[in-house]
Image: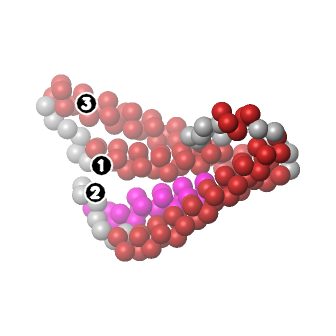
Amino acid sequence: MKEKISSCIDWLMTLIYSVIIILTITMVLLRYLFGTSLIGGSELSRFLFVFSNCLGAGVLLERNEHIKIDIVLNLMPNIIKKIILIINSLIIVMLHGYLLYLTIDWMDKTGMNLSDFFRIPMKYVQICLPIGFVLVIFYALNNVFNIILNRK
């Protein structure tokens, strides 16, 4: 299941970044060659960028490519290293669980505000935050189980 989720996210991230690149190049060319702009292009790029960041956080955690300083960790015995990695993953789960709770309340209060250009409720953009938090929680718990079962 984890592989299917990761594969779908990889495909979606590729699509999102492709659209961002095409939008950015198009907006630059229109601005400098024709003195005009793509109406709504900037807002769409921002929305896609937010989506890519929320999805990317989970993907990086799953691939163990998130920000970390592991010089000291690599000097420790394996059992201590595993304990620290499990504690780290559980802290990530607790933090993102709390952020998920706060985000749902925030979306309830601000989700009906309309975006500037497209005039869509912001809850459709904000939904990427809880999705990203759930992905991070899923991958962090998966990391804990993998460490405990000696799969990593």
**What residue would you read off at disc 2?**
118
Please tell me how crowded label 1 is: few (under 14), some (14-19), or many (20+) other residues with Cα within 10 Å.
some
Mark 2 or 1, nearer chain start: 1
Q: Where is the C terminus found, in terms of image quarters? A: top right
Q: Residue at x 32, y 30 (%)?
A: 25
The magenta stretch spans residue 69? no
Do residues under tags 3 and 2 come within 8 Å of each other at their CB atoms? no
- C-alpha distance separating marks 2 and 1: 8 Å
Do residues under tags 2 and 1 come within 8 Å of each other at their CB atoms? yes
Q: Nearer the viewer, residue 149 or 22?
A: 149
Residue 43, disc: 1
Type of amino acid under label 3: Val
Q: Residue at x 60, y 37 (%)?
A: 69
- C-alpha distance separating marks 3 and 2: 21 Å
At which x and y percent is residue 36?
16, 35
**What residue would you read off at disc 3?**
28
- What segment is highlighted magenta in the picture? 118-137
Do residues under tags 3 and 1 come within 8 Å of each other at their CB atoms? no
Query: Which secondary structure lies at badge 2?
Result: loop
